[in-house]
Image (spheres, rainbow, N blue to C red):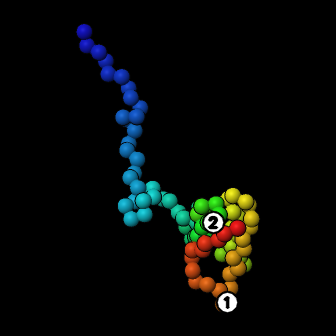
Amino acid sequence: MSQTPRHNPRVDQPPSQPPNRSTGRAPGHVQGGSNPNQPPNPWIGVRFTCAGQYVRVYRKPDAPAYLARCPKCAKCIRFRVGQGGSDARMFDVSC
């Protein structure tokens, strides 16, 4: 007695595209929003030593400051943007 093969929809689908080797992201991924003509939002890294956690903080390009909130105590830290500031991208904060 012969068996008829069953239809397997997973096998019949074309393979998905692998991630881009240079970025590790799927093809078509746009950082900073869905508009490829828009620059990505600037960010800084903040390590809250009291909470033992790292947070990446984003701001809109025209915003005057970064606002970071401690994940443990919810204290808000403001990093102003402007002349005479720091060119560092990573900061340690203790609340």
Q: Please state the total of marks drawn on the protein image.
A: 2
Q: Position of residue 78 (x, y in %)?
A: 72, 74
Question: Could you tell me which residue is drawn at 37 percent across and 61 percent down?
Answer: 21
Q: Secondary structure at mark 1?
A: loop
Q: Position of residue 60 (x, y in %)?
A: 67, 71
Q: Nearer the viewer, residue 66 or 16?
A: 66
Question: Could you tell me which residue is drawn at 50 percent across and 59 percent down?
Answer: 29
Q: Secondary structure at mark 2?
A: strand
Between the C-alphas of marks 2 and 1, the distance is 25 Å
Residue 83's disc number: 1
Question: Could you tell me which residue is drawn at 37 percent across and 35 percent down?
Answer: 12
Q: Amino acid at mark 1?
A: Gln
Instruction: Give the vertical position of 46 relative to 18 (above or below).
Output: below
Q: Nearer the viewer, residue 35 or 45?
A: 45
Q: Nearer the viewer, residue 46 or 28?
A: 46
Neighbour tally class for label 2: few under 14, some 14-19, many 20 plus, Cα within 10 Å? many
Dot 2 or dot 1: first in sequence order is 2
Q: Nearer the viewer, mark 2 or mark 1?
A: 2
Q: Position of residue 23 (x, y in %)?
A: 43, 63
Q: Amino acid at mark 2?
A: Phe
Pointer 2 with pointer 1, Cβ within 8 A: no
